[in-house]
Every structure is written in structure tokens, then in C-alpha cells.
Image (cartoon, rainbow, N blue to C red):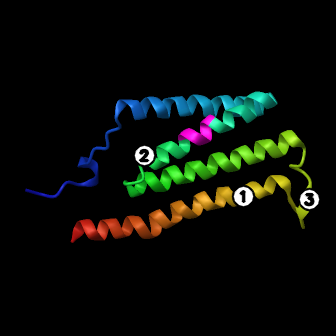
């Protein structure tokens, strides 16, 4: 019998997890609508359930390396996005903090952290997984 290929593998999500992910999307959209419309109470309030569910999803999928990497990147993305929103709401997004960097640019720290996690996954972890599977 031949080994299954990537296209043969299935990843199934239990229904309660799927509902939680769908709720996460709703909270995320409400947060960004609050930001877009400058509805500060909505935008800021929605940070908490959006980030909490992202962390919960990350925790629940921690045993699957690909899911862990991508979900950690999402946690850092939401963190960066939320900081950026708060910087605009509080009016320090254009304040210079160092050289030409402004308060908004500090959001690059969590954005880049998420990117580094994904780079590590695709450049180091995934090739290791393929080597292990081939052996």
C-alpha cells in the first residue's frame, strides 16, 4: 500500500470548534467595523473576545505544528491590528517615537513576530516534517 500524499490527508474540525471560529470572525469584523467607522467603544470592546478566541483556537490546535504556527501568527496579527487601532483612536499614531518611526509603526513588532513564526514554520519546521515523513 502506498503512502498518503498531502492531497490525501484530511483535517477535520469538530463542530464546537468550527462554531467558535465562526464567532471569532464575527468579533473580528465588528472590531474592524468599529475602527473603520471610528466607533471607539465597539472597536476597543471587540479586541477582547477577538483576541481571546484567537488564543483559545491556538491553544486547542497546538499539537498540529502547521496550525500552531498559523494561529500564533493570527494572534500577533490581531494584537498588531488592535494596537494600531488604539494608536489612531488615542491620537498617538502620528507621534514620532524614534527617528521617522511613529506610534503606528510600533505595530510592526507584533506583525513581524507573526511573520517570523511563519517563516520559521515554512523554512525549518515543514521541511523537517517532510524529511521525517519520507524516512
Q: Residue 97: image x %, image y %?
A: 89, 61
Q: Residue at x 25, y 65 (%)?
A: 133
Say which element carries label 2. helix
| Left or right for 73, reference 45 | left
Q: Residue at x 87, y 42 (%)?
A: 90
Q: Residue 44: image x %, image y %?
A: 74, 35
Q: Residue at x 54, y 62 (%)?
A: 117
Which quadrant of the figure has residue 54? top right
| Left or right for 59, reference 86 | left
Q: Main secondary structure of the magenta part?
A: helix
Q: Are marks 1 and 2 in contact (CB under 8 Å)?
A: no
As displayed, is residue 107 above or below residue 29? below
Tell me which label, 3 or 1, sits earlier in the chain: 3
Tell me which label, 1 or 2, sits earlier in the chain: 2
User: Residue 36 colored magenta?
Assistant: no
2 vs 3, front mark: 2
Distance from the alpha carbon under mark 2 to that under mark 3? 39 Å
Which quadrant of the figure has residue 13? top left
Question: What segment is highlighted magenta in the picture?
Answer: 49-53
Residue behind mark 3: 96
1 vs 2, front mark: 2
Q: Residue 19: image x %, image y %?
A: 44, 29
- Which mark, by number, is residue 108? 1
Q: Residues within 10 Å of mark 1 (few under 14, many from 20)?
A: some
Q: Residues within 10 Å of mark 2 (few under 14, many from 20)?
A: few
Q: Residues within 10 Å of mark 3 (few under 14, many from 20)?
A: few
| Left or right for 74, reference 122 | right
Residue behind mark 2: 60
For the residue pair 64 and 104, the one nearer the viewer reads as 64
Say which element carries label 1. helix
Amino acid at each position: 500500500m502506498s503512502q498518503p500524499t498531502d492531497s490525501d490527508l484530511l483535517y477535520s474540525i469538530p463542530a464546537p470548534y468550527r462554531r467558535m471560529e465562526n464567532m471569532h470572525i464575527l468579533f473580528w469584523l465588528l472590531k474592524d467595523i468599529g475602527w473603520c467607522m471610528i466607533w471607539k467603544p465597539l472597536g476597543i470592546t471587540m479586541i477582547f473576545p477577538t483576541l481571546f478566541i484567537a488564543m483559545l483556537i491556538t491553544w486547542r490546535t497546538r499539537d498540529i505544528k502547521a496550525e500552531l504556527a498559523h494561529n500564533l501568527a493570527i494572534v500577533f496579527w490581531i494584537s498588531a491590528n488592535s494596537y494600531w487601532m488604539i494608536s489612531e483612536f488615542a491620537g498617538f499614531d502620528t507621534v514620532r517615537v524614534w527617528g521617522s518611526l511613529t506610534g503606528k509603526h510600533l505595530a510592526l513588532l507584533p506583525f513581524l513576530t507573526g511573520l517570523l513564526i511563519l517563516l520559521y514554520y515554512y523554512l525549518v519546521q515543514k521541511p523537517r516534517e517532510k524529511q521525517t515523513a519520507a524516512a
